[in-house]
Image: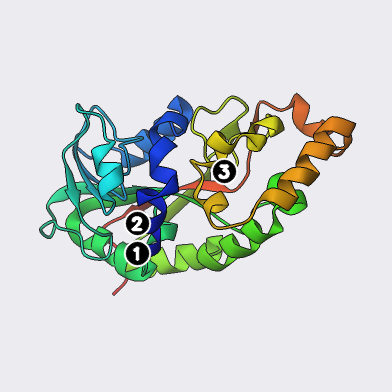
Amino acid sequence: MVERMALYDGIIGRNYAEFRRPDHRIASAIDAALGDAISVVNIGAGTGSYEPLSRTVLAVEPSEVMIRRRPTDAAPCLQGSAEALPLKTASVDAAMAVLSAHHWTDLARGLGEMARVARKRAVLLTWVPDAAPFWLTEDYFPEIAAHDRKIFPSSAALVTMLERTIGPVHMAPVPIPKDCTDGLLCAYWRRPESYLSAEVRSAMSSFARIDAEAGLARLRADLSNGHWSERNRHLLALDTLDVGYRIVRCEIGTKDN
């Protein structure tokens, strides 16, 4: 998690809590996937987004900056990594990871740790590269798409890994609403002008890795001359869009040995 800590201790951590406010519709999907779990560990917890208030939560986060930015009433947080969770075996009902698994240095080891500490299930909110292309990365920032295809496993590869490491898998799309309050990379799919804001981009790890100026110039021009609207007119009638986010639920202890 060295790269993740550098990102979040630096640029991203400063504005993260302001622009990455939990969206209640995404929160509902996560809460439903947790099922009857009473105690939950949130891995790569950041500032505490999507930690369910109705359950006993323990957070694990590697970045000191993110830990300091957690609200005073947030769940208790331990500094640690997904690959070596500072928890005893079978000490919680469920382990969850919300858009953090792609920052882990060893995905298989992190999933193994989820299986070790959880008694019932593991829940991930993640993104899959085999989803339909997204206009932002397809037309303006292909370097983001190229990088993400390297670090995110495909749906099939992820299911295979999870079934081998944890247990049976249920994967479902999480459509992103047009007014999503969580400023994740694809949140502004119907609000393209938002990507021109340096503050909005500062809460997205994808932009911290690239020189975005050329893509921003193209987007700014296309918004000004109407080309963006012409190419993406079909989006303007939609209230939600599947841009590749998936909620994944794995049951513990029933995988084939």
Residue 2, by quadrant, is bottom left
Left or right position of 99 against 85? right
Circle 3 or circle 2, nearest the eye: 2
Q: Which residue is mark 2?
A: 5
Residue at screen point 35% across, 54% down? 250
Residue 165 visible? The answer is yes
* Camera-side mark, 1 or 3: 1
Residue 206 in the image, given as x and y percentages of width and height: 55, 52
Q: Nearer the viewer, residue 4 or 96?
A: 4
Q: Which amino acid type corresponds to the residue marked 2 in the rendered image?
A: Met
Q: Dot 1, how many residues are within 10 Å of its Cα: few (below 14), some (14-19), or many (20+)?
A: few
| Label 2 neighbour load within 10 Å: few <14, some 14-19, many 20+ | some
Q: Which mark is residue 2?
A: 1
Proximity of marks 2 and 1: CB atoms separated by less than 8 Å: yes
Specify the quadrant that holds the C terminus.
bottom left
Q: CA distance from mark 2 to mark 1?
A: 5 Å
Tell me if 122 is positioned left or right of 86 in this view: right
Please tell me the numbered disc located at residue 185: 3
- Direction from residue 219 to residue 29 in the image, left or right: left
SS for tag 3? Answer: loop
Residue 184, how many percent across, how many down? Answer: 52, 40
Three-letter amino acid code at disc 1? Val
Q: Dividing the image into 4 quarters, which one contains the N terminus?
A: bottom left
Q: Are marks 3 and 2 in contact (CB under 8 Å)?
A: no
Coloration mode: rainbow
- The first of marks 3 and 2 along the sequence is 2
Q: Relative to residue 79, is residue 65 drawn left or right?
A: right
The number of numbered discs placed on residues in the rendered structure image is 3
C-alpha gap between disc 1 and disc 3: 21 Å
